Structures are given as C-alpha cells and as structure tokens.
Image (cartoon, rainbow, N blue to C red):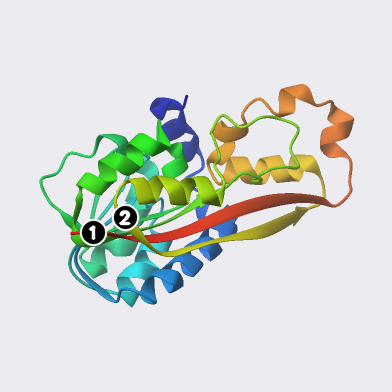
Amino acid sequence: MNSTKNIRYCFNQAADSYDGQSYIQKQIGLCLIQSLLSHLTNATHIIDLGCGSGFTTLQLAKAIEYQSFAAIDIADQLLTKAENRLNPYGVDVYAADFDNLSTSKQFNLIFSNMALHWGLQFAKTLHSLTTQLAANGVIAFSIPLTYTFQELPSRSRNVFYDLKKIKTMLEKLNLSLLNSDEDYLVATFNSMLAALRSIKASGANYLMSHTSSRLNKTQLTKLQTFDLTYHVGYFVAKKND
C-alpha cells in the first residue's frame, strides 16, 4: 500500500530535477489533452489532480475555456513551481490529497495525468471522484498500465491494471466511455543505473525503491542500451445524468 508521506517526500526531493526528467510524462499529458479536446473544449469548473510542477496543467489551461480551475498535489515544493507557472492563468493551486478531496464544488472536468495510480485504492478513488463530477461532467486521465517498467527485476508497489479492467471499472460507475486507448513509450538509457536515476529524478522512485538492493554493481552499471517501457492508458469518460 502506498504511503502518502513517503510519496510526498520522494517528489519533493525531485522538485529541482522534475521538469528536466519528466519528459515522458509531459508527452503523455499532451496526448491526453488532444484526446480530451476531441470531446470537450470548455468546462465551467475544472480540477487537475496531481498537477506536479504544473507543466501539463498549463497546456490544458491554454487549450480550454473555463470559469474556475483548481490544481492540486501533495508535494508542496512542486506546488511552488506550479503556482509560479499557473498564476497568470488564474489557476487556484493548493496542497491536497485526491483520495481525501474535501470540496462542495461539482466539477465539469476532472483531469489527471499519470497520477491516479498513487492513490491508496484505485477503484475507490474512481468512485470518490465520480461523486465530485457534475451531471454530464467529464473525467480524463492517463495512467500506467500492466507492462510499465517491465524491464526492471522488481515488483512495483503499485497495482497496474490492463485497459480492459479500467474500462470495466468506469462502466460500473455509470460513466460512458468517450475514448480509451493505450500506447507504449520507451525511454532508452546507457545502463540500468541511468534508468533508475532518471526515475528517482522524476520523483517516482517510491514505486521501485527496493529494485537496486536486488542487483549487484555490475548489473547496475554495465554500459549497454537499457530500455524502460511506459505502458500508458488514456481514458475520457462522461458521467450520465
């Protein structure tokens, strides 16, 4: 089970390197926005869950019309960067845990890029977020799927689902799927150690924190092409009124 305190610590530690190392996450976020814009170009009230440093949030704010826009994360040092980036767009940036989101507002768009897998229990998180959606509201999110980091000799702390399982979860919540798709993105490094350092620099090292202890120095530092796979799911769904 995830520890919110430990996850916050890992992402705060990576605050200075996050933007430079989260290029895969940025690419995924841009793809998610394009998928969303095929179905929605304006929303009265928007919230971005797990906004990080605000890079993807900014792209969404530029692309869509809104009346109010909130962006939340648990890592305060990343939020400082997000606030500086998003202040000109009137986005309300604050610290909050999406598993315990306390607001009376109903959102017309709930957006999340590569963050919902950090929740304590994904199915319960989805159910809770659905209650925060206004009638005909849309939830759009990207999330790692089954084969993410398949090259690493360690089991993830997180449970990664396949596309079909998440589609079934959404349908059981009375959400109509507008789009569901998956993709494989591969980052190439010159050693396994370089790959692990990249994960740490993007804040996601809590996910694989025991990997290096199972490997010897030769395995870690051997200079050969090492691929790291991101198996990503994209979902856009609408709440039935």
Residue at the extreme left of the image, as rendered = 104
Q: Amino acid at mark 2?
A: Leu
Q: Earlier in the sequence, mark 2 or mark 1?
A: 2
Q: Position of residue 89 (x, y in %)?
A: 24, 69
> Can residue 13 be spotted in the picture?
yes
Placement of 8 over or under 37, stated as above or below: above
Which circle marks residue 35 in the picture?
none
Q: Position of residue 180 (x, y in %)?
A: 48, 61
Disc 2/disc 1 C-alpha distance (Å) = 6 Å
Task: Report the residue marked by disc 2.
Answer: 175
Q: Is residue 79 left or right of residue 101?
A: right
Q: Residues within 10 Å of mark 2 (few under 14, many from 20)?
A: many
Residue shown at 40%/26% (left/top)? Answer: 5
Q: Position of residue 84 (x, y in %)?
A: 31, 59
Tell me where residue 146 sits by quadrant. top right
Please identify the quadrant where the C terminus is shown: bottom left
> Can residue 22 be spotted in the picture?
no
Task: Report the residue marked by disc 1.
Answer: 240
Q: Position of residue 87 (x, y in %)?
A: 25, 63
| Element carrying mark 2 | strand
For the residues labelled 2 and 1, say whether their Cβ atoms are less than 8 Å apart.
yes
Q: Is residue 14 left or right of residue 127?
A: right
Residue shown at 25%/34% (left/top)? Answer: 100
Q: Amino acid at mark 1?
A: Asn
